Amino acid sequence: MAKFTIRVELRNADSSDYEKLHKKMAANGFKNIISSGSGNEYRLPTSEYIHESSTLSRSELADLVYDIAESIKTHPAVLVTESVGRTWLGLKKANPLSLN
């Protein structure tokens, strides 16, 4: 199964627009929490998500995310990267009550 990291930028957006984005992304299976090998969970930077898929290509995933983001604000910026591994520093531990 392929692992992806997705970054979304909404143009001329405010915090309520990003809250809508987060809800729509979560409803479509995108997460903003990443797990370490030791089981700790960390919150990704604002409007960054992870997703796993065995059926979608990077391009198809970018199209899907673009459509989700564009339903909130026109002309969003979307970056999709396929990952074979991730390393991070400085991410905040996730609230265990909020896993999405």
Image: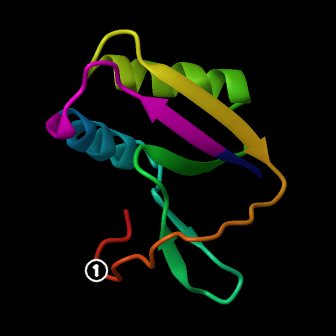
Visible residue check, residue 30: yes
Is 82 part of what is drawn in magenta? no
Residue 21 percent across, percent down from the top left = 30, 37
In this image, 16 relative to 6: left or right? left
Within 10 Å of disc 1 (Cα), the crowding (few <14, some 14-19, many 20+) is: few
Q: Residue at x 57, y 51 (%)?
A: 50
Q: Is residue 89 above or below residue 2?
A: below
Please tell me whether mark 1 sits on a helix, a strand or a loop.
loop
Q: How many marks?
A: 1
Q: What's the magenta region?
A: 5-16
Q: Is residue 5 above or below residue 87?
A: above
Q: Residue at x 84, y 54 (%)?
A: 84
In this image, 81 relative to 99: left or right? right
Q: Is residue 76 above or below residue 53?
A: above
Residue 83 percent across, percent down from the top left = 78, 49
Looking at this view, name the residue that lies furthest to the top. 75
Residue kind at label 1, given as amino acid type: Leu
* 12 or 2, nearer to the observer: 12
Q: What colour scheme was applied to this rendering of the protein?
A: rainbow
Is 12 part of what is drawn in magenta? yes
Q: Residue at x 73, y 29 (%)?
A: 57
Residue 9 percent across, percent down from the top left = 43, 29
Looking at this view, name the residue that lies furthest to the right. 84
Residue 58 percent across, percent down from the top left = 71, 29
Looking at this view, name the residue that lies furthest to the bottom. 38
**Residue receiving disc 1:** 97
* 70 or 60, nearer to the observer: 70
Looking at this view, name the residue that lies furthest to the front. 90
Indicate the quadrant where residue 93 lies.
bottom left
Q: Name the quarter where the C terminus is drawn.
A: bottom left
Visible residue check, residue 55: no
Q: Residue at x 57, y 40 (%)?
A: 6
